[in-house]
Amino acid sequence: MSEAAMEHAPVRVVAPILFATEYVVGALMQWRWPLAALQGAARWAAAAALAATGLAVGIAAIKSMRRAGTSPNPYVASAALVEAGPYRVTRNPMYVSMVLVFAGLSFAFRSTWSLALLPLAALAVDRWVIVPEERYLLHRFGDAYAAYRARVRRWI
């Protein structure tokens, strides 16, 4: 990759849009070909637990990035390698957050198809977003990122 291409992560897919698209496709499939969904209090408990955990992880990740003086936007150059907060547990807490929130929404709105398709969206984000971001971070931070990558898992 050229130096110009490495001013920021060469990401061509916007992860939240990819997850939202997967959710909508699943919801349409649920409408057309209904699958059984969790009901009652268990449904709401699963929805609330997943969505709340996802929001908490996402907010903590953004706060950690701001404290480090860098942007969560992959289209902006990274000013610092963030290893604090949820970044101690996963290299991609914002994507983990999105998976949890969309899983919570799937339970809340009884969209079993959306829940079933969620691993495909996560795989797409892994390949089309995370891999280019990691190449960029290795280019930008070198050995420090390589050591961090060896210590902390990509997802969980």
Image: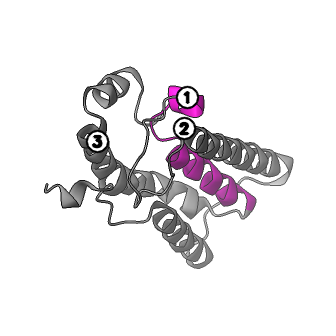
The residue range painted magenta reads: 85-108
What residue would you read off at disc 3?
Answer: 140
Residue 37 in view, yes or no: no
List the single residue furthest toward the right: 41
Task: Look at label 3 and name its amino acid.
Answer: Arg
N-term mark: 3 or 2: 2
* Residue 84, disc: 1
Residue 85, position as x, y percentages in the image: 60, 30
| 60 or 81, nearer to the observer | 81
Q: CA distance from mark 3 to mark 2?
A: 16 Å
What secondary structure is found at the residue carrying circle 1? Answer: loop
> Would you say the residues marked 1 and 3 are in contact, meaning their CB atoms lie under 8 Å apart?
no
Front one among 74 and 92: 74
Coordinates of residue 78 in the picture (x, y in percent)? 40, 47
Q: Is label 2 or label 1 in front?
A: 2
Q: CA distance from mark 1 to mark 3?
A: 18 Å
The residue that mark 2 highlights is 68
Taking the spot 65% from the left edge, 46% from the top edge, the residue there is 54
Q: Residue at x 61, y 39 (%)?
A: 67
Residue 75 shown left or right of residue 35 in the figure:
left
Residue lying at 24% horizontally and 54% vertically, measured from the top left:
6
Q: Is residue 83 above or below residue 107?
A: above
Asked whether residue 141 appears in the rendered view, the answer is yes
Residue 143 against residue 154 in the figure, above or below: above
Looking at the image, residue 88 lies above or below residue 72: above
